[in-house]
Image: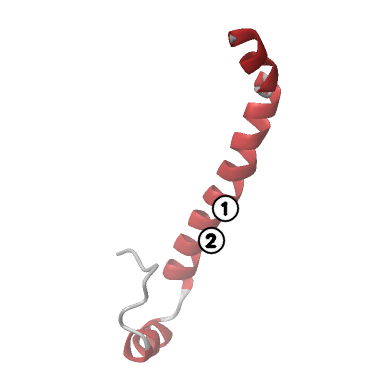
Amino acid sequence: MWGTFAEWLPSGLGLFCTFLAFFIPFIIHKIYRKLYQNSNPPWKKEEQQKASPSYPGKSE
């Protein structure tokens, strides 16, 4: 029974590449979000807060 189940599992390299396919874009997204938050001029930050104060993905 375990033999047939083990045949269906991807190899270690396949699992590693799947992990990287998720992890790399996730980290890039987090880096870009931090850069965006830190690089906005103060006047633009005030405009964005007035326009949409409850952005669902916003983390402060």
Measured in 3D between alpha carbons, the distance from the residue under mark 2 to the one under mark 1, in whole angstroms, is: 6 Å
Q: Position of residue 40 (x, y in %)?
A: 46, 76
Check the image and report above or below for 11 versus 17: above
Q: Please give the residue where the numbered disc 1 appears in the rendered image.
A: 28
Closer to the camera in the image, 42 or 29: 29
**Type of the residue with mark 1:** Ile
Residue extending farthest to the front is 1
- Quarter-wise, where is residue 47 in the image? bottom left
Q: Quadrant of the N terminus?
A: top right
Closer to the camera in the image, 41 or 30: 30
Q: Residue at x 32, y 90 (%)?
A: 50
Q: Please give the residue where the numbered disc 2 appears in the rendered image.
A: 32
Classify residue 16 as left or right of residue 42: right
Secondary element at image label 2: helix
- Quarter-wise, where is residue 60 in the image? bottom left
Q: Position of residue 38 (x, y in %)?
A: 43, 67
Q: Residue at x 67, y 33 (%)?
A: 17
Circle 2 residues within 10 Å: few <14, some 14–19, many ≥20: few
Q: Position of residue 58 (x, y in %)?
A: 36, 68
Can you tell which mark lies on residue 13? none
